[in-house]
Image (spheres, helix red, strand yellow):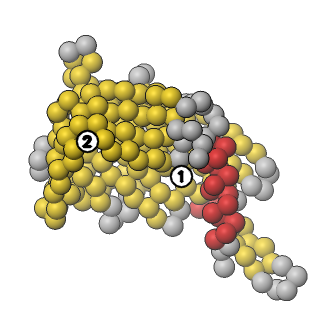
Amino acid sequence: MRNPLKIIMLLFLLLGVAGTANSAGTVVKYMWNGGGASASWADQYGSSWLEVNESTVNHQPVAYLSFNTNRVDPTSEVCLTDQDGNTYCFYSRYYWEYGYGQIPIGDFKASSNGATVNTSLSGSPNFYYTRCDSDEINWTWTCTDEAPAVTISLTWSNSRESSSFNSGVNESRFGKYMYRTNGSYRSVSARVSGSFLGYALPDDTRGNISIGLNVAREIIVAPKP
């Protein structure tokens, strides 16, 4: 069986080391004006979160995309047997990815009934990306800022299951980043499908389609807890 304690400890180690890469402070700040969409999902290999919003820069429409993910390499499963004959299995390689910044406005389309994003990170010069890999067998830690030549291709479909109105300051934290929203926006529930950085989303992925006006968005490198 897998040793869940070791997996949890390694994930905390991974996120803890990642949190020391930058000092605390805002890395992205923009005004959300228009459509937006978000999604989060998890499977046996890890979890991910993504958000995309319409905005303007120098009176020109743009879209902002942000995401984070932490996953194990499914090919890295290792099984060890102790002196009492108990066998423990765990994944020895982990990685996390963060991305945020502008993508071409034509890569994102949103309405009250649905939304789509189809974009290549390697073709977006105003987009920041980083990935770090941890190998617990060889004790290596490697990072790269070169975005992979793969497409993020997601579709949101209004599920008409729920809707919400949000106002004020909302904060959430994923890994080393804090995401802050200040303003008012409306959201409807959505089913989400497609592919993300080379793998297909789980069938039960859920998200939201939103619309906001003059909503301040910040991405902040959060201090370690």
On screen, residue 67 above or below 10? above
Residue 211 occupies quadrant: top left
Quarter of the image with the N terminus is bottom right
Kindly report the distance in space between the C-alpha atoms of the residues bearing marks 1 and 2: 29 Å
| Secondary structure of the residue carrying numbered label 2 | strand
* Number of marks in picture: 2
Query: In front here: 105 or 13?
Result: 13
Query: In front here: 165 or 106?
Result: 165
Q: Position of residue 45 (x, y in %)?
A: 53, 62
Which residue of the protein is positioned furthest toward the top in this rendering? 58
Q: Residue at x 82, y 86 (%)?
A: 85
Which residue of the protein is positioned furthest toward the bottom in this rendering? 84
| Secondary structure of the residue carrying numbered label 1 | strand
Q: Amino acid at mark 2?
A: Gly
On screen, residue 124 above or below 173? above
Residue 191 occupies quadrant: bottom left
On the image, numbered disc 1 is attached to which residue?
70
Q: Amino acid at mark 1?
A: Asn
Q: Is residue 60 left or right of residue 127?
A: left
Asked if the residue at tag 2 contacts the one at tag 1, i.e. Cβ–Cβ closer than 8 Å, the answer is no
Q: Residue at x 69, y 66 (%)?
A: 6
* Residue 20, visible in the rendered structure: yes
On screen, residue 177 above or below 135? above
On the image, numbered disc 2 is attached to which residue?
168
In primary-sequence order, the first of circles 1 and 2 is 1
Q: Is residue 160 left or right of residue 89?
A: left
Q: Nearer the viewer, mark 1 or mark 2?
A: 2
Q: Residue at x 25, y 13 (%)?
A: 58
Q: Position of residue 126 (x, y in %)?
A: 41, 22
